[in-house]
């Protein structure tokens, strides 16, 4: 096949037709043609030559050129595509290294094999361009809902025709036991789009919480307009879900807007989700209030939050316990996912028993250690004192407010508490020494003798040992294992050492040992202050 004037325009027409069919840029098809023609010319003139082809975008005329590059004498390797400065002087007045000499060469007549090869190059380039277009198109649509038609089912996975490509709905992304037949219409959430060798892979989902949020956005105009925002979603796909919403317009009720007239809006979402029951909950900045809402329809008597542990205790009336927990723990599990907190539920009777047990334990502690009678010890506990440290080092005025306590009695109480604490510290230090704790750790500021003892029992006996500890090893934390929050006990957790304090202690030890440059540490601290949000995220990860 020769590139003649008769078929020059045909090249451009073919390129445009292919581009329209595949919905790609016509220039990409022309570039593929140029590359295929250049490859055919190399097979005619020699593979060592640098042959290039340029197709005029208006006339379709193909120009074949041979390019030779000027190189240093010692770098000359390919005599067909390179030449020295001296050799280039017959073509250029003042040749320099890197200059190019371009000569037009006659067009080639393409034989059957060359034409077939050129066709393969063009098809390959067109396929690559089509895959890139598909990837960009679906990558931009990730996080949205798409309508498709079921093509087939393979090993429980559903292959969906989504227009200019295919998506896969995996077995674990389907709701319950729903099944589909070919040509069924299906609505899915685009969860992920990946670029792979066989083309872009579009992963769909019907179980993702975001799917429900997008469905509500389609059904509720106020959400689409941004007047109402979906703050959190928790789902048990096909069974039950909770969705937290907030309104930025005081005149619009977020729950009512999502429910719709006679439940029309929420019912449309329920029907799409195979009858999944949906609790719509008003979101609140106050964690306790939000949790009370999240545990609906159960009533809550009291909420106790432990922010450091990310844990929350909920007290409910005895007759509300089963409702709060839900069938197989479903209600409390969804509430936990919605709030991001670990929730413990107990009845009023259980909470009363626990408080009584704590009251008795603290009363006994003060009776035994401070040599008090039961009545006086109960007075201390009733005033909020929980341990000896509080009695020993509290401002004396806080003791004087207790009925029957004068200044002499208060001083005597504090003296007894301090004496007992000093005795405990002496025994703890002796035990720590017996376990092999060295002076480098004992002399380190910030640790008490009882802390030395706890560290020594775990094999940490020197300042070097202490400096190798992670902050969460000392302060404790929470780890998520198989979706469940598991408690990691810290070596110093019983002494109420926080994650920040543990981190500060460990970094101070490393500075003292010369492992860390204090100037670099100060620079990092300044940077963390400039980026408080990022620092908070890192802290959260360390605690987890």
Image: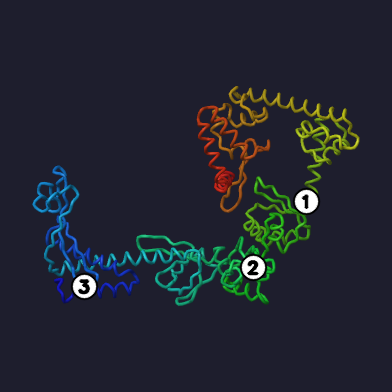
Residue furthest left in the image? 90
- Height in image: 82 above or below 4? above
* Residue position marked by numbered label 1 in the rendering: 350
Task: Tell me residue 5's x, y (percent).
Answer: 15, 74
Q: Quadrant of the N terminus?
A: bottom left
Which numbered mark, 1 or 3, is in the foreground of this view? Answer: 3
Which numbered mark, 2 or 1, is in the foreground of this view? Answer: 2
Q: Residue 346 or 242: which is nearer the viewer?
A: 242
Q: Secondary structure at mark 1?
A: helix
Left or right: 428, with 169 as reference point: right
Task: Tell me residue 177's x, y (percent).
Answer: 54, 69
Q: CA distance from mark 1 to mark 3?
A: 89 Å
Q: Residues within 10 Å of mark 2 (few under 14, many from 20)?
A: many
Which numbered mark, 2 or 3, is in the foreground of this view? Answer: 3
* Residue position marked by numbered label 3 in the rendering: 59
Instruction: Write down the quadrant of residue 41 in the picture.
Output: bottom left
* Residue position marked by numbered label 2 in the rendering: 278
Left or right: 184, with 234 as reference point: left
Left or right: 316, with 176 as reference point: right
Q: CA distance from mark 2 to mark 1?
A: 31 Å
Tell me the colour scheme of the image: rainbow
- Height in image: 99 above or below 190? above
Residue at point 49%, 76% (across, down): 185
Instruction: Write down the quadrant of residue 120 in the picture.
Output: bottom left
Q: Secondary structure at mark 2?
A: strand
Q: Secondary structure at mark 3?
A: loop
């Amino acid at each position: 096949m020769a590139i003649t004037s008769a078929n020059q325009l045909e090249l451009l027409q073919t390129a445009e037709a292919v581009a329209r069919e595949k919905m790609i840029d016509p220039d990409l098809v022309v570039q593929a043609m140029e590359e295929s023609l250049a490859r055919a010319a190399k097979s005619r003139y020699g593979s060592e030559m640098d042959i290039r082809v340029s197709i005029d975008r208006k006339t379709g005329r193909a120009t074949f050129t041979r390019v030779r590059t000027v190189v240093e004498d010692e770098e000359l390797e390919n005599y067909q595509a390179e030449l020295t400065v001296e050799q280039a002087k017959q073509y250029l007045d003042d040749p320099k290294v890197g200059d190019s000499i371009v000569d037009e060469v006659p067009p080639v007549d393409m034989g059957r094999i060359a034409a077939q090869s050129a066709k393969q190059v063009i098809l390959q380039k067109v396929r690559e361009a089509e895959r890139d277009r598909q990837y960009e198109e679906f990558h931009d649509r990730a996080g949205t809902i798409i309508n498709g038609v079921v093509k087939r089912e393979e090993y429980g996975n559903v292959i969906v025709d989504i227009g200019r490509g295919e998506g896969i709905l995996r077995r674990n992304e389907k709701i319950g036991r729903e099944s589909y037949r070919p040509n069924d219409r299906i609505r899915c959430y685009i969860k992920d789009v990946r670029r792979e060798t066989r083309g872009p892979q579009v992963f769909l989902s019907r179980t993702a919480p975001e799917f429900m949020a997008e469905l509500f956005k389609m059904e509720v105009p106020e959400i689409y307009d941004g007047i109402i925002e979906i703050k959190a979603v928790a789902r048990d796909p096909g069974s039950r879900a909770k969705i937290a919403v907030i309104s930025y317009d005081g005149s619009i009720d977020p729950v009512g807007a999502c429910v719709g007239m006679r439940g029309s809006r929420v019912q449309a979402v329920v029907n799409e989700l195979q009858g999944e029951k949906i609790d719509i909950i008003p979101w609140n900045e106050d964690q306790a209030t939000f949790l009370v809402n999240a545990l609906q329809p159960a009533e809550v008597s009291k909420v106790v939050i432990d922010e450091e542990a990310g844990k929350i205790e909920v007290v409910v009336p005895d007759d509300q316990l089963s409702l709060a927990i839900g069938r197989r723990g479903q209600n409390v599990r969804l509430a936990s996912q919605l709030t991001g907190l670990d929730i413990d539920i107990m009845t009023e009777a259980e909470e009363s028993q626990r408080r009584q047990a704590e009251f008795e334990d603290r009363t006994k502690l003060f009776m035994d250690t401070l040599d008090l009678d039961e009545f006086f010890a109960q007075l201390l506990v009733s005033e909020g004192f929980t341990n000896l440290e509080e009695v020993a080092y509290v401002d004396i005025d806080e003791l004087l407010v207790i009925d029957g306590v004068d200044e002499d009695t208060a001083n005597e109480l504090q003296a007894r508490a301090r004496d007992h604490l000093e005795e405990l510290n002496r025994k703890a230090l002796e035990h720590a020494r017996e376990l092999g704790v060295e002076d480098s750790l004992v002399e380190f500021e910030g640790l008490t003798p009882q802390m030395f003892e706890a560290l020594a029992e775990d094999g940490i006996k020197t300042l070097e040992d202490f400096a190798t500890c992670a902050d969460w090893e000392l302060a404790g934390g929470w780890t998520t294992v198989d979706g469940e929050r598991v408690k990691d006990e810290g070596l110093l957790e019983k002494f109420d050492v926080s994650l920040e304090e543990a981190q500060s202690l460990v970094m101070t030890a490393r500075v003292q040992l010369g492992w860390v440059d204090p100037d670099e540490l100060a620079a990092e601290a300044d940077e963390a202050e400039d980026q408080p949000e990022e620092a908070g995220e890192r802290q959260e990860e360390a605690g987890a």
